[in-house]
Amino acid sequence: MGCRKSLKVYILDARLDKFKENVGAYSEEQGERFHQDILDFERRYQGQYNEYMTGEYIWGLIREMYVVAFMGNTGWFEVPTPLAGALVQRETQRHGDTETRRHRESAVMRACVIAVLLQLLLSDSQAMQCREVAGQLRQIDVSGGQVFGTNADDAIFTLYRDCWTQVPGALKHITVGPSGIWGVNSTNAIFKLVNANWVQVPGQLNQIDAGGVQFVAGVNTSNNIRCLGQRYLGSPVFWQDIPGSLKYCSCGPQGCWGVDNSENIYVLLGVTTQQCQGTGPWQQVNGSLSMLEVGSDGSVYGVNHAGDIYHRDGITSSNPAGTGWTFLRECGKSKHVSFDQGHLWVITQDNQIMDCS
Ligand SMILES: [Ca+2]
C-alpha cells in the first residue's frame, strides 16, 4: 500500500476549513460505537498502558475509514479499506447514491481531524520511515550488520550489497547473532553454519535464537525452552532446560524475552555465557505480543496479534525489563520484526520486506 510505494500519508490540516460543516456528520451511532469499542479495548488491555490503548483505538478508526495519500503532482486520492467499503455501502443505503460522495468526503474529513488530534495527543507513539526492500520473506533475523531470512518455501537468503543471495539448504527459521548462524528445518532438526556448511546439531527445536552472548536458546513444538552454552557444544551436546512454556524466544545482552501461546510476554534475567538458564524464573511483563526480538543492543521490538509493532521503553542494565511499550506507526500490518544498528526490519503479513528507522 502507500508506504511501500514511498507515498507519504499527510495530515490534512489544510482541509481543516471544512471541519465545521462536517462536525454534524458525527452521529449518535458513532458515539455508541465509541463506547462499545473503548469497552472492547479496555478488556483487551486489561487496564494496562491506557495511553497506548487510546492510540490504537484512534489509529483503528483511521484505518477503518480512509487512508488519504498524496502522490507527487497527481493529487489527493483515497485508498478505501474493506471496512471503509462497508461504510460507504451503508451510507449509500441510507442516503442514496447522490449523497454518497458527500458522506465519503465527510468520512475523509473525520479521518483527517482524528489524525491531527492524534499528532497533538499521542506523544507515546512514534511514526517510522520505511522503505520497501525487494523480495519476499516469511521470517527475518538481523545482527552485526548481517541480514538472514527464510521464505515460504523454506529457501534461505542473506542480504549482500543490497541484493538477496540464496544460501544453500532449507530452513523454516534462521537466526544470526553473537553465537553464529543457526536454523531449524521443517522436521525441527537444528543446524549451525560452520565454514559455509550446515552442520546438524543434536536436538529438536521449532524456533531458535542466536542473540545471546555465546549461547543459543529456542523452543520446541511442545513449547519447552532450551538453551545451549558454548561450553556444552561438544559431544554429546548438552541442551539445558529453562523452566517455563513459550512459543517464541529471543535473547540479547540484558536477558532473554519470550511470548507464550496466550501471547503473554516474559523476560528472563541473569542470563550469561556460563548460565544460559539465567537466574530465573521468567517474569511476566505487561502487554500482549505474538512474537518479539531482542536486538544486539538489548532493545526489544515485537508484533501483536493485530499486526501492530511495539518497542519496549526504558531498558537499562539496572532495569532490564524496561518500563512500557511504545506503539510504532507504520503502514500496513506486520507479522515479524528484527532490529539491528538502528534499523527495524519488518515482514508484513503478505511477506513484504520493509527496512524502517
Ligand atoms: Ca534474533
Image: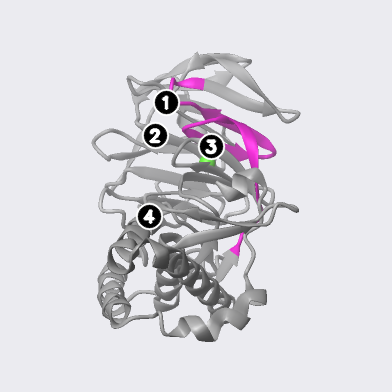
Residue at image x 35%, y 74%? 48
Give SS at disc 2: strand
Give SS at disc 1: loop
Q: Earlier in the sequence, mark 2 or mark 1?
A: 1
Which residue is label 4 attached to?
85
Residue 352, numbered label: 3
Type of secondary structure dominating the magenta stretch: strand
Quick check: marks 2 and 1 in contact, CB under 8 Å?
no
Q: CA distance from mark 4 to mark 1?
A: 37 Å
Q: Quick one: 76 or 98, which is closer to the camera?
A: 98
Q: Is residue 249 above or below residue 318?
A: above
Range of residues picked out in magenta: 127-155
Q: CA distance from mark 2 to mark 3?
A: 21 Å
Q: Earlier in the sequence, mark 4 or mark 2?
A: 4
Give the quadrant of residue 194: top right
Q: Of the residues tagged 3 and 4, which is closer to the observer?
A: 4
Q: Earlier in the sequence, mark 2 or mark 3?
A: 2
Q: Earlier in the sequence, mark 4 or mark 1?
A: 4
User: At label 3, which amino acid type do we have?
Assistant: Gln
Q: Quick one: 186 or 253, which is closer to the camera?
A: 186
Quick check: marks 2 and 3 in contact, CB under 8 Å?
no
Q: Quick one: 47 or 23, which is closer to the camera?
A: 23
Q: Is residue 152 magenta?
A: yes
Residue at image x 43%, y 53%? 81
Q: Earlier in the sequence, mark 1 or mark 3?
A: 1
Quick check: marks 4 and 1 in contact, CB under 8 Å?
no
User: At label 4, which amino acid type do we have?
Assistant: Gly
Is 176 left or right of 57, judged from the image as shown?
right
User: At label 1, which amino acid type do we have?
Assistant: Lys
Give the quadrant of residue 90: bottom left
Q: Of the residues tagged 4 and 1, which is closer to the observer?
A: 4
Q: CA distance from mark 1 to mark 3?
A: 17 Å
